[in-house]
Image (spheres, rainbow, N blue to C red):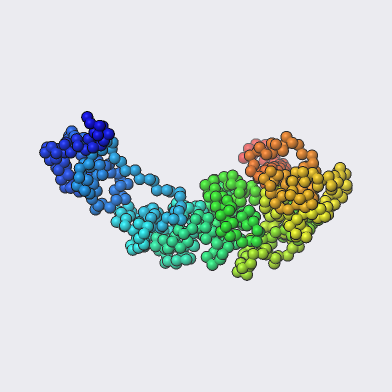
């Protein structure tokens, strides 16, 4: 063998192949197999009876291939020994069956912003009840570059109860978004009812998808669906249809089905908590950017998948609602759904100073307008939408239920940015964005007076301030700014300064804290101080409710026993010795 032949084995193999194919018998066999393939109209496995070509097997067809491929198209096996593209013979393939694997269609994944409606037309038609034969017959419409022509397919329609697959699988929204999405499409593209039922046609859904969904990411789609079409922001009342659907269909809220009043209060609580977390500027108007920066969409999906509503502690937990509403009810002694300054002073066993209560009523954020006694009302949104300021048309002489939620969430968890800014705005009397020594001294003077009256050891202002500076480490020792409290290394203790200035009970607990208990608190299962407080307080409230029920049952039993004694005396007087008591 020459050096050239050793260096070029491919050339030698080609020479051997040409020599083999030049044999007349081999060539005749190849022609016969090609003729058989043309006569059958599709490619077949080459006959294993032909010894030289036995290793080559044809393509295996599947049901999925039959549905997706047009039946009239003529296919040639790419591993066939004769390629019709150039008419030249090719080398035989290895002895491996050729199987076409198609990726599964996503069932719980929404269309991506770059995916056109037509590129997912088979799945969408399947959701609208179109048969595989119709999908195959219109396979050319599935190309993203071609416009979708509804034709007879466009007359296919879905009723509300059959629209869930479109809502969940195609649009990527939670299940309880089904009815609001269905109504939104019908309001934008009206269509006549069919057999007395409202429907959405495939053609109208395609128009909605191309206009409202396809050009946007998942957060923008959510934002555009929840807000009203003519608005630029999400307002308080925009969430009501979605929370109402959650109340109607979530298994963890079935017990509220006969309690309309508490359904309303639960909805108000969920929506207010959403605005507390998402609407960081607290002006009552949520933007698309705020939705994108929050975990709201993930929380909606979580509550859709989770049967235990209390496991979704973000926004939706019924136990959290129970704690918030019971605390409000305890303070609202006249049952007018309004809390006065005197009512709020009783919060937490009179732990708050009168000075901070006055500042809460005068300066704390209030994003919602007057809602008629604490129930969620409708914003005067058209008059407010142009501005960015906080609503000021509500009297500051009382606090509604929504305002109380803002207060309590901030009071029981001071280790996050929202509560820090809430209390910072209350302490910053002059509004210069700094807490100077004069402002802090004026608040702490009230605390000193309370310590003295209650017989506690007095901690001088200078000692307290030095301790807080060591803990928080502000950029300047002359004043604190909001960013000082938000440093990652001290955010879990930044609330101590606020407690020292206006919450005497918590400040005394902070002074007497057990390091071992603090370590346990950091290692427990709760994600925030609010979750921990809500769990403990709910257990307390539940035990108190059980005690009241047991006491009521004992009273009922005593009453029943007295009635039974009277009945026995009457029965014995009426029965003769020879008569049975029945």
**Residue at figure coordinates x 64%, y 64% from the top left:** 388
Closer to the camera, 59 or 406?
A: 59
Image quadrant occupied by the N terminus: top left
Estimate the x, y position of residue 176 in percent, counting from the top left. Answer: 51, 54
**Residue at figure coordinates x 14%, y 42% from the top left:** 32
Q: Residue furthest left?
A: 24
Judge whether residue 103 can be spotted in this image: yes
**Residue at figure coordinates x 82%, y 55% from the top left:** 438
Image quadrant occupied by the C terminus: top right
> Is residue 470 shown above or below 156?
above
Q: Please indicate whether residue 205 sits to the left or right of residue 348 in the image.
A: left
Q: Residue furthest bottom?
A: 383
Closer to the camera, 64 or 580?
A: 64
**Residue at figure coordinates x 62%, y 65% from the top left:** 379
> Is residue 6 shown above or below 149?
above
Q: Please indicate whether residue 164 sits to the left or right of residue 495 in the image.
A: left
Q: Which residue lies furthest to the front in this view?
A: 3
Judge whether residue 361 can be spotted in this image: no
Q: Please indicate whether residue 328 sits to the left or right of residue 134 in the image.
A: right
Estimate the x, y position of residue 425 in percent, counting from the top left. Answer: 73, 57
Estimate the x, y position of residue 506 in percent, counting from the top left. Answer: 77, 45
């Amino acid at each position: 063998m020459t050096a050239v032949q050793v260096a070029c084995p491919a050339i030698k193999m080609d020479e051997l192949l040409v020599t083999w194919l030049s044999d007349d018998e081999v060539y005749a066999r190849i022609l016969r197999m090609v003729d058989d393939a043309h006569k059958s109209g599709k490619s077949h496995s080459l006959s294993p009876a032909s010894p030289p070509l036995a290793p080559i097997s044809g393509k295996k067809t599947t049901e999925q291939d039959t549905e997706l491929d047009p039946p009239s198209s003529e296919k040639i096996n790419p591993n066939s020994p004769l390629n019709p593209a150039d008419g030249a013979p090719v080398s035989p393939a290895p002895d491996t069956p050729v199987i076409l694997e198609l990726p599964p269609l996503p069932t719980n994944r929404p269309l991506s912003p770059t995916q056109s409606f037509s590129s997912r037309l088979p799945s969408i038609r399947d959701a609208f009840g179109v048969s595989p034969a119709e999908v195959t017959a219109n396979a050319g419409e599935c190309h993203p570059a071609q416009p979708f022509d509804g034709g007879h397919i466009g007359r296919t329609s879905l009723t509300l109860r059959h629209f869930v697959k479109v809502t969940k699988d195609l649009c990527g929204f939670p299940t309880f978004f089904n009815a609001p999405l269905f109504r939104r499409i019908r309001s934008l593209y009206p269509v006549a009812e069919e057999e007395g039922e409202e429907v959405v046609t495939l053609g109208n859904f395609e128009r909605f998808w191309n206009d409202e969904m396809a050009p946007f990411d998942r957060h923008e789609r959510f934002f555009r669906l929840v807000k009203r079409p003519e608005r630029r922001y999400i307002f308080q009342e925009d969430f009501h249809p979605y929370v109402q659907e959650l109340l109607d269909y979530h298994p963890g809220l079935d017990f509220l089905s006969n309690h309309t009043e508490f359904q309303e209060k639960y909805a108000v609580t969920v929506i207010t908590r959403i605005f507390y977390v998402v609407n960081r500027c607290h002006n009552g108007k949520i933007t698309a950017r705020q939705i994108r920066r929050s975990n709201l969409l993930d929380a909606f999906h979580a509550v859709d998948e989770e049967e235990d509503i209390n496991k979704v502690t973000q926004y939706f937990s019924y136990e959290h609602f129970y704690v918030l509403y019971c605390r409000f009810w305890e303070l609202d002694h006249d049952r007018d759904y309004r809390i006065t300054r005197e009512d709020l002073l009783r919060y937490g066993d009179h732990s708050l100073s009168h000075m901070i209560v006055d500042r809460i009523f005068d300066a704390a954020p209030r994003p919602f307008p007057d809602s008629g006694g604490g129930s969620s009302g409708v914003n005067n949104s058209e008059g407010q939408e142009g501005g960015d300021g906080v609503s000021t048309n509500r009297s500051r002489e009382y606090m509604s239920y929504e305002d109380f939620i803002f207060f309590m969430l901030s009071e029981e968890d001071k280790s996050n940015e929202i509560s820090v800014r809430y209390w910072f705005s209350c302490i910053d009397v002059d509004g210069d964005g700094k807490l100077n020594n004069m402002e802090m001294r004026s608040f702490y003077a009230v605390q000193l007076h309370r310590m003295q009256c209650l017989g506690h050891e007095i901690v001088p202002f200078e000692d307290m301030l030095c301790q807080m500076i060591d803990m928080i480490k502000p950029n300047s020792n002359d004043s604190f700014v909001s960013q000082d409290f938000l440093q990652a290394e001290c955010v879990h203790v930044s609330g101590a300064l606020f407690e020292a200035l206006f919450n005497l009970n918590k400040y005394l607990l902070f002074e007497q804290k057990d390091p071992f208990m603090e370590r346990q608190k950091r290692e427990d299962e709760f994600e925030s101080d609010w979750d921990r407080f809500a769990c403990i307080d709910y257990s307390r409230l539940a035990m108190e409710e059980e005690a009241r029920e047991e006491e009521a049952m004992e009273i009922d039993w005593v009453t029943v026993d007295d009635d039974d004694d009277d009945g026995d005396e009457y029965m014995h007087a009426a029965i003769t010795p020879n008569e049975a008591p029945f």
